[in-house]
Structure formats: structure tokens, C-alpha cells
Image: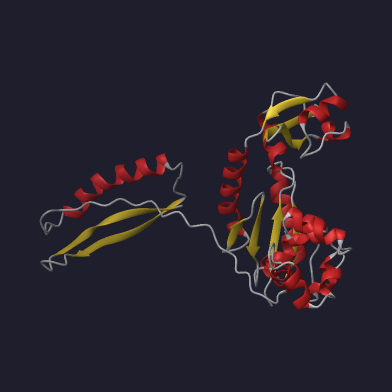
Amino acid sequence: MKRAASIWLPHLAIERWAKSADCPPDSPAVLTVEGTHGLLIHAVTKAAAERGAHPGARLTDARALDPSLIAVQADPEGDSALVQRLSKWAGRWSPLVEVDGDGLRLDVTGVAHLFGGEQGLVRDIHRRFAQMGLTSRVSIAPTAAAAWALSHHAPCICGPDVAAQVAPLHVSALRLDSDTVRTLERLGLKTIGALIGLPRLALARRFRGGEDVVDALDRALGRKAEPLTAEPADQPPRTLLKLEEPATHPEAPAQALERLIPRLVCELEGRRLGARSAVRGSLLRLDSGTGARVHGGDAFLPRR
């Protein structure tokens, strides 16, 4: 059975900022972004939240409640870059990791036994993010959409009966746009369970001009496939030496390595990579034009 994990980092922006901030950890600080009518609050510390500040509110309104709020410009690009780096690091749990806004989605089918089961996998994810000072909310479900919905609304490990698990969740857990959510609420359809019981044709007709509610519901319940898209893997460090003539002298490989290894070291330094160990091997190249062989010598190739 397919299993997908969703890792949500709900306080990523404020926790990343706090690591390098000059303010005390209990300061009533908020991170802001530009809005249509002034600055909007993007993230808040616990102290600021206790004083009435919350994400999405206007800074002027929050300061009307508490003038002592400390406002700092948010860094969404830096937050996104961190999530991108975390997606590479999260390969410890899955060979397929997808960046998903302020979190990650992973295909964990058949890997949980390596961590003592799904409970052990979830514990390991929480522990490792906590070591970096990041709060994580994790859910595992048969579909990626259900895993996302549960991690954001009711973190748990979901069994085969996805419908029963997601039915109590608010319709916003289907990742619909705000206008569609408001329309559903006005119609009295506030939970996913209320949508499940409706005739599909009527639901499709009602929302055919806007967000596809039926499509979102089908992805959550597994009626429609939603494959994850892994981030492109970085190409391994490499360097190349092209020769105008075939090299047949037995010392040619050693001389080539003297020129290639410094280049490889420079590339490793530029990408802030290193070698944990080296593999000893021999060089052998057949020239496609002349058929001449270049062989002999030893090479030490780095493993990342």
C-alpha cells in the first residue's frame, strides 16, 4: 500500500529568524511583508501571539493593541532556500522528496521498517528537526493530499480508511482557494465529510467555473493519483580534460590526474562539499576516433 508523509514546519520563518536575532527569545517580535494596504504580519513569536498579534493581520492593527511590538522585515526567499536545502537532507527518510511550500512531502512506501515502523519514523523526523531548532508536524497517509491535510489540521498516522480520517477536517484542508472555502461555508458544507456525501455530478456543476472541488476530494481520497515530484538532484562534482591527440604514454594518466585533481578540489570548495572517503580505481578510455587506449595509473575519486 502506498504511503506518503507530510512534514509541515509551521514556525519556520520565526524560528529561522530567532537563531540569528539580537532580540531576547521572549521578545514580542513579528516578521512583516508588504501588503496591498501596508505591512502585514507574516510570523510571530509566542510573546507577540499572546499580545494579540497573528499572521495575516495588519501591523498597524496589531500595534493598536500593543504598541511595543517589534517589527522586523521577513525573508521569504531565505526561508524557501532553507526548505530547498532540507529537501536534500530529508533523503535520509525517502528517495523521493518534494518541496511543498513551508514543508515537505515524501514517498515513504516500504521504508518505515528501517526506522522501527511508522511511529518510529515519525519520532525520528521530529527528533532531527528539533535538533535544528525547528518545530515539525508530521502525518502519514495513503495519499499525499490526505497526509498534507492531516499534518496541517490533525497530525496522525492514517490507516487505509482515509475517508473516515479526513471527514472531520475543515474543507480548507483540501487546499481550496479562499473564495471557494467561503462559498462552501455559506452552503453549510464546512467539513470534508459533508462533501463526501454529496452527489459528485452536482458538486462538479456547482464549482466547474472555479476551484475543482471534486478533483481535490478525489486526490485526498485516493480516487485520483497525485504523484510526487522530486527536486532535481545536483550533478556530482566532476572535471574533464580533453586531449587533441591520443595519449598512449604509460605516464599519461598520472599526468592527467595532476591537472584534474586541483580542478576537482576547486569545484568541491566552490559548492561547499567534501569527500568522506575515496575510491581507488584505474583509468581506461577508448578514443572513438583512433581506437587508441589510454590506461594505467590510479585515481582517487571522492564520495560525497
Q: Which colour scheme is used?
A: secondary structure
Of all residues, the one furthest to the top in this rendering is 68
Q: Is residue 56 above or below residue 177?
A: above
Q: What residue sits 65% from the left and 69% below the top?
A: 111
**Residue 45 vs residue 108: left or right?**
right
Residue 18 placement: quadrant: top right
Report if residue 192 is visible in the image: yes
Quadrant location of the N terminus in the rendered image: bottom right
* Relative to 265, residue 188 above or below: below
Query: Quick one: 182 or 92, which is closer to the camera?
Result: 182
Where residue 249 sits, quadrant-wise, is bottom left
Whether residue 178 sits left or right of residue 94 in the image: it is right
Position in image of residue 248 (x %, y %): 11, 59
Question: How many marks can you see?
Answer: 0
Q: Between 281 and 82, which is closer to the camera in this rendering? A: 82
Whether residue 155 is visible here, answered yes or no, is no
297 on left or right of 14? left
The image quadrant that residue 19 belongs to is top right
In the picture shown, does residue 21 fall above or below 293? above
* Nearest the eye: 153 or 285: 153
Residue 154 place in picture, x, y as percent: 83, 59
Q: Which of 39 and 225 is in front in this view?
A: 39
| Image side of residue 75 versus residue 148, left or right | left
Residue at the (26%, 52%) spot, across then down? 240
**Image position, residue 67 (x, y; %):** 83, 21
- Up-down: is 95 above or below 67? below
